[in-house]
Image: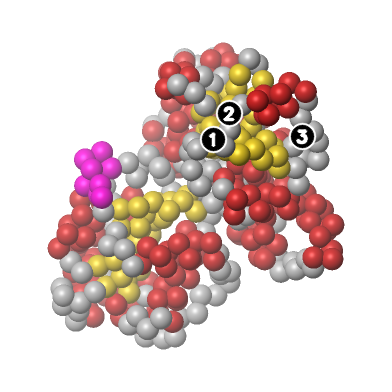
Amino acid sequence: MENILYQYNPWWENEFIPKGIKPRDIYLNKLRKYQKDNVIILVTGLRRVGKTSLLKLYIRNLIENNVKPQHILYVSLDDYLLRENTILDIVENYRRIMKINLSEHINLFFDEITYKEDYHQQLKNLYDHQNVTIFASASSGSLLQDKKAYLTGRSVALEIQPLFFHEYLQFRDIHIKKSESYLLESYFKDYMRDGGMPENVLNPDRGYLINLVDDIIEKDIIAFYGIKNHQKVKDYFSLLMERSGKQVSINKIRRILDISPDTSKRYLSYFEKTYLVHLVSRYGTTNERLLSPKKVYACDLGIKYLFIGKRDLGSYFENYVYMNIRNSRDIYYLYQNGIEIDFITSDKILIESKYHSEMNEKQKTLFQSYPAKKRLIVNDIQQVEKLREII
């Protein structure tokens, strides 16, 4: 095991400079804040969204802030050579190799934590009995579920999203002066096409995104849940992308695909748990939230583009607005008497997305008359960028 750990942790022997990785300050700043808290940080999000890169950047940050390199352990738990070792085995071997006693503080980074079945209990053991800060990543929301509540009160989740538009520009080394802000709309249309998956932004390739979607569906849904009819699952996802930004009817999809209502409901939950789609409930009573159709949004605009191409740019814009606000607080859609307002927050901020367009009269009436704390109409990319600061 010693050779394996040295391979994973080059900073033990040499200066560590992550190569080919661009920083994401939004998330690095959040990790810095968590570092001071006595918690386990679970880094989640879509496959290939940059979770490993973020962990490596943060390791570099720790070293720059005078944390001893030998007090940092990184390991990817999907490594075949580590299949027989528990997390506790790995940490014990690490302490032995580095001659670190139990009273000394160490930083543990576990990539792909869900490859160890009982990881909840093992992390609890480390947290309770050793002087550690723990960072762990996972690509499946379902596997992160802590059914026995081992980590309750001990952990926080940090979801990594695809690049926001301003990050997209940074990754592509595009610098737009305020006097040239008219260029933003043109670049935003490129962003709609390319999306925000970091590798695809640096080297746009339709095949990359196709392989990514196939990989997630095959490994995290079909194989994990033992689904026999592969094509039904893939067709289901295609239908979801066609309906992204709209209310999705489980019954309508099940009739199209000739599957049972229960199967249709389960498939939808699988796509949500793997972060391929995000679901938004209707605002209202508990019954309305549970029983009303949910709106569906794509995880990434580039993936959405694979399925619907360059049409209905307003739906891309609405999708992007949602991506910017989804982690700020609970988000719902407002629906009354057949009229819909895109979003309402848990503290009653109304948000309507209109990409260079206007609301019809019925929407205006509902938007103005509904007892909201604040009303926001977002109709261009510059307003979206300000939206995160407002709410």
Label 1 and label 2: CA atoms lie apart by 8 Å
Q: Magenta stretch: give its range.
A: 146-153
| Quadrant assignment, res 92 | bottom left
Query: Mark 1 is on which residue type?
Result: Lys
Badge 1 vs badge 2, beta-carbon distance below 8 Å: yes
The residue tagged 2 is: 371
Badge 2 vs badge 3, beta-carbon distance below 8 Å: no
The residue tagged 3 is: 312
| Residue found at the very far bottom of the displayed protein | 14
Q: Quick one: 28 or 243, which is closer to the camera?
A: 28
Label 2 and label 3: CA atoms lie apart by 30 Å
SS state under label 3: loop
Task: Indicate whether residue 184 is drawn in magenta.
Answer: no
Badge 1 vs badge 3, beta-carbon distance below 8 Å: no
The residue tagged 1 is: 348
The location of residue 128, given as percent across then percent down, is 17, 59
**Residue drawn at point x = 67 percent, y = 20 percent:** 339
* In the image: residue 379, left or right of residue 76: right
Please say if 332 is above or below 35.
above
